[in-house]
Image (tube, helix red, strand yellow):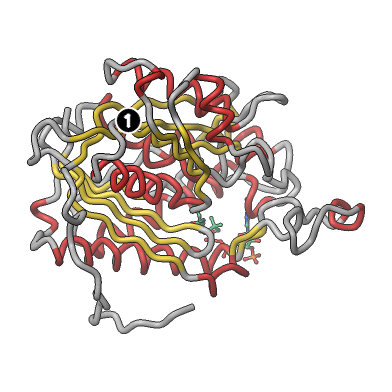
Amino acid sequence: MQKESQNAIPDHRPAGLGCGRPTEITALATHVPPRVLTNADFEKMVDTTSEWILQRTGIVERHVVEPGIASSDLGAAAAKKAIAQAGLTPDDIDLIIVGTTTPDMFFPSTAALIQHKIGASHAWGFDLAGACSGFTFALATGSQLVSTGRHNHALIVGADVMSSITDYQDRATCVLFGDGAGAAVVSAAKDPSLAILDFAHEVDGSGAPFLQMPAGGSLRPATRETVEQRLHFIKQDGQAVFKFAVRKTEEISRLIMQRNNLTPDDIDLFVSHQANMRIIKAAGERLGFPECKVMINLQRYGNTTAATIPLALHDAIADGRLKKGNLVLLASVGAGFTVGSVLLRWAY
Ligand code: UT7
């Protein structure tokens, strides 16, 4: 892992989005499958207790799909709602970017499958492998492509069926993850002051050993042995990821605030990736955010990887905690490692 001193934040990158037109999120919607796994359910599956799961993670329940339901199904359901909410039709969408760690299959892309399922007849698109930073990475990418004027409406999807790669015999990981999707429509900003303002993203591949699915890719194609060794499931060094997540969530958030001349007082809502309540609270405290400014909803969904941030934004709107004009800071840390942050002023 790269080492930096606590105080010196390396920042050679310019703030802001460049010279293009401002962009905004015009609509956001989510979808989770109806089936719920509670902490009590895990007591029957592995050697754990509801108390351990709640105290160590903050998670109470998570949604999981029935067999035959894939990331494209969850993503398409969220996308249809978001497009309608934006007052658009699928034909208006120029571009679909899907952040996912659990594509329906290696190929074709989940973006192509969603394009077909929603009938977005004029769109091109692609999948983006940013793990838990899938939504922040996809949001910044789509924003840039709309910003140039070359595209008018980008559909940004974070969708994951984590239950498809979760080992329900491994108590250290199986209690953490859930399935879900969120979709946002990104368009030219109607009011340039209510826009996506900045992003700062990083990857650090030295973190790969700490969180990965070891087999099934080109390095270790599926064999009888890889299946028997349960290598097609998530493997995680929880403590290493925990420490990195707290440090980098703070660091990337500080960086983007500093270069936009902002203090925690200026931020109305801090929406971090939802992996562990203790990570979010530790990062929020280090940054100096009061609890009321820190969005936490992983109690209900667990870690849905690329879907956590849109699920949190959606619940913040529903709870009246996110309103038009609010300054919002998104932050994510995930496998790779990936690190993301997006600063935006909420547009609706
Ligand atoms: O989204 C991407 C990234 N992922 C994350 O951000 C996750 C980061 N990591 C974490 O959230 C935490 O490290 C975990 C929730 C995974 C684990 O919490 P922890 O406080 O770091 O626990 P630990 O790994 O240090 O394990 C403590 C003990 C161990 O037992 P011993 O060795 O002390 O006897 C584990 O075997 O807890 C045990 N343990 C469990 N006990 C009951 C691990 N999982 C469970 C479980 N139920 N489900």
The one nearer the camera, 203 or 191, is 191
Q: In the rendered image, is residue 38 in sight? A: yes
Residue at the image point whose x is 51% and y is 26% from the top: 115
Q: In which quarter of the image is the C terminus?
A: top left
Instruction: Provide residue 283's location: percent of width, then percent of height.
Output: 31, 60
Residue at the image point whose x is 84% and y is 56% from the top: 226
Q: What residue type is labelled 1?
A: Val
Ligand 1 - quadrant of the structure image: bottom right
Instruction: Provide residue 94's location: percent of width, then percent of height.
Output: 38, 31
Residue highlighted by disc 1: 185
Residue at the image point whose x is 67% and y is 59% from the top: 235
Instruction: Provide residue 329's location: percent of width, then percent of height.
Output: 23, 50
Q: Hey, which residue is sitting farthest right in the picture?
A: 224
* Left or right of 169 on screen, residue 268: left
Q: For mark 1, give the secondary structure.
A: strand
| Above or below, 11 relative to 167 | below
